[in-house]
Image (tube, coloured by chain):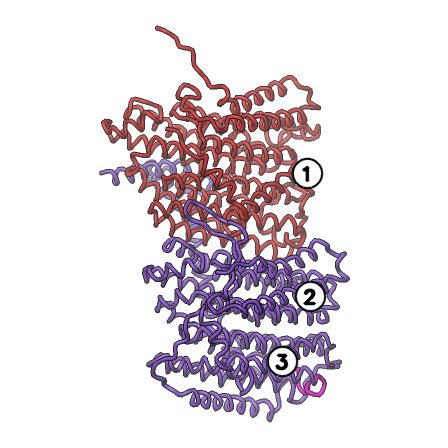
Amino acid sequence: MTFTAPVLNYAQLAPMLIVLGGALIGVLIEAFGPRASRHASQLFITVASLVAAFAALVRVRNQSSVDAAMGSVGFDGAGVLLQGTILIIALLSVFLIADQENFTALAAAVPGSSEERESLQLDLRVTEVYPLTLFAVAGMLLFPVSTDLITLFVALEMLSLPLYLMAGLSRRRRLMSQESALKYFLLGAFSSAFLLFGVAYLYGYSNSVTFAGIQASITGGSGNDVFLLLGIAFISVGLLFKVGAVPFHAWSPDVYQGAPTAITGFMAAATKVAAFGAILRIFYVAFANAEWQWKPALVLIAIVTMVFGSVVAITQRDVKRMLAYSSIAHAGFLLAGVIALSKSGLDASIFYLFAYGIATVGAFGVVTLVRDSAGEVTDLNRWSGLGKRSPLVASVFAFFLLAFAGIPLTSGFIGKFSIFSAAYETGSTAILIAGVLSSAIAAFFYIRVIVLMFFKDPVEDGTSVVIPSALTTTTIAVTSLITLILGIFPAPLINFIESSAFFIR
Amino acid sequence: MTTSTSLVYLIALPLLGATILLLAGRRSDKWGHLLATALSASSFGVGLYQLSQMLNRPTEERGVSQKLFSWISVGSFNVDAGLLLDQLSICFVLLITGVGTLIHIYSISYMSHDENRRRFFAYLNLFIAAMLLLVLGDSYLNLYVGWEGVGLASYLLIGFWNQKPAYATASKKAFVMNRVGDMGLSFAIMIAFATLGTVSFSGVEEASHTASKAALTAIGIMLLVAATGKSAQFPLQAWLGDAMAGPTPVSALIHAATMVTAGVYLIVRSNFIFDAAPTAQLLVVIVGAITLMFGALVGTAKDDIKKALAASTMSQIGYMVLGAGLGPAGYAFAIMHLLTHGFFKAGMFLGAGSVMHGMNDQVDMRRYGALRKFMPITFITFGLGYLAIIGVPPFAGFYSKDAIIETAFNAGGVKGILLGGTALLGAAITAFYMTRVMVLTFTSKERWEDNQHPHESPILMWLPMAILAIGSVTTGFLFTRGHALVNWLSPVVGEHAESEEMLLQPMVVSGLALLAVAIGVAIAVMKYQRADVETVAPQNVSIFTRIARKDLMQDSFNEAVFMRPGQALTSLLVKGDENVVDGAVRGIGRTALGAGASLRKTQTGFARSYAALILIGAIALIAGIWVVTQ
């Protein structure tokens, strides 16, 4: 038996390695760093490794290879775009996370215990959230570039495990936060099991775990079709769970509500990019030739997801739950890009992911600002009249909502427009009709919040908008600016995506 | 088509004003209103210059366009942000900037006591810019941006006095009802894009020759929905009356002359679609006919002078929509009525504002009376507008409304008789309720509350009224002389086609219309001039009056038809999400475990029901794929 040393393309893996390295340094700081300077040094390490990873990514942006890591990681234009998007979103989210007001003082303390009181009095900070974020980001970077099923599974777990913990870090309503974390964990584990099951079936079908091998088997058509069917179905369950598509969505409203808002923003934006990146790659590369098997089912899921998310969002009374249902609806719109299975579908999906991710971080950033003495106020009734009290903050939030609704002059409009036209070009008329109808319904509940903020009288119950910290201000300003610019001059980004987005097979 | 680089100034000037005033804040309180007025006036100047340029070019080269930048380019699909000024849009440009400037001037005085006057002028300028973008956009998408823009500006203006709760509610109602219309426009754009592959006016016009009738009908109907929302047409008319809560100059600018007529512009601009989709066109006429009667009937019962004028606006726009629905024979007349209406209705709204100014903001006409003596200029200018709207020759409304009634009669067959009859009856009711307004306000006995000292308004207010009054006297004659407007518009809306056989000769129609007007006026004079008018609306009135006072039950209608079913549907879905899934799981569990399981409170959030849902979903997914594959 001979042992071949693995050949790794370190330049192409550098973004992930840098982020992982940063995370490990973070762990060391947690263990050995002096408590007083921990927060500052953690923040510095996190920001520095994200920026360095981005720089490393820019350096290798024009390379592509199937073999970045022994056939397990592919490196191509679409991968670069998705990784870049994840890094930008992560950086903006870290700015929100840095505002520690929302996090528990000591994550390990039991809610209501004397330990917790003590930690609050000592004004402790949870600094472990930074290495956790970096671990999650590393998993997210790997997820859309995995080209075999084992790496895909590892990446999924790598991004999920830190997120489960982070969901439980809320400073207020800790029981709810911990409940959501546990729920997320249990259901996440359940769906991971489905994914793993699917991996086994696909191996049984094709005798291979690489996307290229599965693709070859499907083209050859020699395998057992029942295994292929079960494999596609189970893998889909695992991936659709992560993006919150109906009927695998049930966790998302609870978790979005329970998690600290900054984490919710990060999770909603970055996880969606990573998971849709993986979905796009696996369906465009591995399953493309089995289109006739999965397409009808996925079309149905997409339609149900759009309609369900939009309709149920109407009745939500909590801003975070409403955004959760809105993100379910957006997952449906994004599935339209997957179903298109064309170059324009891929371009549109990547643009949509970028635009949606940026706006989502911004919107949750605004949510962190509306507070009373007991922390964030997420009850929508108490947001009424916000436009009179803080016109600027309310206008920015309204702008993000309009972007979600897809009103012209926002990035959301261009995103919806291009994704629906891609779906239409490939003949998915049903998707187009359902998409347009549910955008109409969705527009209604976004508008409802705007009406509430601007046309209702303010409530006098201590709800107020805090002066945001410099970092939070940066995030909100940058995200709203990008959302506006992409609405007016989307052409440069669209052209860039068009020229570089492709999957290596 | 000729290109120009100066079209953008039309929009940029007022937009600049809005930006400066909003950014400079309180610092610009002293001069903000003057700057806004000057910029609006210079935009009007640019419009006049464009008109003179246009007149110098031969007919087929009159349209000019300007590409601003490439907006969306996705694959083979391109949309440029571009402007288009042709014979149709120049009419609107001059109306918007001309009447707009007059209203700016009027507002300088009308709003002089308001500490937020600068903000008001910033919104006015913003509105002008958005409205110009609406009429200058060269594609449905660009039009849509302006369409949303005027919406935004109008909510800001209606809700300007938003410290008063009723006003904020009105603004909200306008906002919500307009969303329904806007949704129609976005559907129209999406359908156009999906079926024709383009959204520019020229592209859609070209594609409409070969497109399927079904697609064009769908686009047409969606455009009509959009028009009903913006132009307060049946069944989306309910917001206009409530929107009167805003300052009166706003009502004059937005709810009389410009924004509410955007629906008519949209229909006329899309003439190529409606000409190829007769079903959609028929719906347009029906909507127009219903609204013109609806508005007229509501107008008879309103005691609030602004609401009476709002009902009348609704009704007059009904005439325009009716005209626009009659095809090439009616487009030009619809635009003509739109322009004359812009003059006389804006003038009357400003007149109403002047009356309110002199009467401590009283709006109840039952508390007016005999103001002729105290406000002679207001009386004369309002009176000229009144003669124009009821259609007395030679005032403007006579020419434009008569043309629509005549075209309606000649639409052919039973349809022609029905439409013509409705339009004629509407004219009689218009004469009745407008005479009622005139009599109650100016000529009947005084019924003022105590401490009223009516007085004429200052020159900055009556000068715009006077200029608009001149317009309401002369424009009808000018537009019809030698078919000036009809010929001017024909390159855009198609050659004006006289119907082959006329049901009624023009002279007969004019005679009938004048007779109808005379009857309406006579009844109103008898009822209100001769008899004493009560200061409080009598309650023991017929059921019809009561229904009319309640805006023909429009709110109850909306509630019953839209609100309740909508609420029921959503609560059903939520219940489904909360109970059915969990309930089903509990049901299965109970069956399995026998009677041992106790009933639990209905509560969501169980991780196990979520997991069960995932399982059910996975099984359904496999079953789905299985069925497809077999």
Q: Same subunit under labels 2 and 3?
A: yes
Dot 2: chain letter: B
Colour red, chain: A
Q: Is residue B347 magenta?
A: no
Dot 3, crowdedness within 10 Å: few (<14), some or many (≥20)? many
Residue lying at 66% horizontally and 44% vertically, measured from the top left? A372
Return the x and y of residue B223 as percentages of the image width and height: 43, 63
Compared with residue B270, is residue B323 higher up or lower down, i.e. above or below?
A: below
What amino acid does circle 3 point to? Ala
Return the x and y of residue B294 as percentages of the image width and height: 47, 76
Compared with residue A275, is residue A34 higher up or lower down, i.e. above or below?
A: above
**Residue B598 visible to an observer of this rendering:** no
User: Which secondary structure, mark 1?
Assistant: loop
Compared with residue B71, is residue B452 higher up or lower down, i.e. above or below?
A: below
Among the 4 quarters of the image, the one containing residue A129: top right
| Residue wearing tag 2 | B37
| Residue wearing tag 3 | B469
- Front label number (1 vs 3): 3
* Labels 2 and 3: the sequence-earlier one: 2
Q: Which mark is residue B157?
A: none
Return the x and y of residue B265 as percentages of the image width and height: 49, 67
User: Which secondary structure, mark 3?
Assistant: helix
The span picked out in magenta is B367-375
The N terminus of chain A - image quarter: top left
| Residue wearing tag 1 | A469
What amino acid does circle 1 point to? Ser
Among the 4 quarters of the image, the one containing residue A108: top right
Return the x and y of residue A447 as percentages of the image width and height: 53, 54
